[in-house]
Image (cartoon, rainbow, N blue to C red):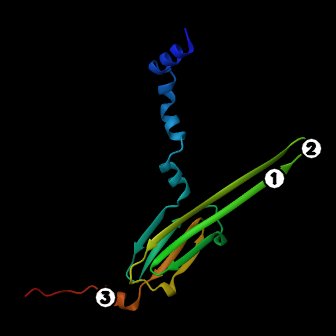
Amino acid sequence: MTTKALSRMKAQVPSAFENFFKPWNEWLQPNEWVERVLTVPSVNIQENKDDFSVTLAAPGLKKEDFKIEMDGNQLTISSENEESAETIEEKYSRKEYNYSCFSRSFALPESVDSNKITANYQNGILHLQLPKKEEAKKASVNKQIEVN
C-alpha cells in the first residue's frame, strides 16, 4: 500500500483511542475562550445605597502589581507581572520565565464621585469602593407616592 493510500485510510477510519481522548484533547487545546478565562480575572459589581462595590479575584499578585486609572468616567484596572528564575549547575543551566497581564475597563455612571474611590488588596481579592455623589444619594431615597 502506498503512503497516500495509508493516509486516506487513516482519515476515514478513526483510531480506537481518538474518541476516548477527544474530550481531553478539546479541553487541552488552547482557544480564545480558554486564553481569556485564564488571563482575565472575574469581577463582581454591587450597587449599594451609598456606593458601588467592585471586587476582582486576582490571587498571587501583590498590591504593587495593580495599576488603577480614571480617564473621564472610565475606570481601568490592570496588572503586569514578570518573573524569572535561573538555575546554573555544573553541567546545565535552566531559565524559566513567567509573564502575566490583564486589563479591565468599566464605564462609570455620573453618580460616582471619582475623587473618593478607594482600593484595598487582601487575600487575593482587590476591593474598590466607588462612593456616590451626595446628589445621587438623595435622588435614590425611597419614597411613597400617593395614588389619586
What's the amino acid at mark 3? Ala
The secondary element bearing badge 3 is classed as helix
Horizontally, residue 84 falls left or right of residue 5, namely: right
Residue 58 seen by the camera: no
Q: Residue at x 33, y 90 (%)?
A: 138
| SS assignment at label 1 | strand
- Count neighbours of disc 3 (C-alpha within 10 A) and say few if under 14, some if 14 to 19, many if 20 or more: few
Point out residue 51 in the picture as x, y percentages from the top left corner: 42, 81
Q: Position of residue 34 (x, y in %)?
A: 51, 49
Residue 69 versus residue 20 in the image, above or below? below
Q: Quadrant of the C terminus?
A: bottom left
Marks 3 and 2, how far apart at CA? 72 Å
Which residue is label 3 attached to?
A: 139
| Residue type, label 2 | Glu
Q: Residue at x 51, y 13 (%)?
A: 5
- For image coordinates 39% across by 79% down, the residue present is 109
- Location of residue 65 by image quarter: bottom right
Return the residue at label 2: 90
Q: Amino acid at mark 1?
A: Glu
For image coordinates 54% across by 81% down, the residue present is: 118
Asked which quadrant contains residue 106, the reply is: bottom left
Tag 1 near tag 2, CB within 8 Å = no
Mark 1 in CB contact with mark 3 (< 8 angstroms)? no
Residue at which label 1 appears: 86
In the image, residue 13 sits, relative to residue 135, either above or below, namely above
Considering depth in this image, is 4 or 45 the residue closer to the camera? 4
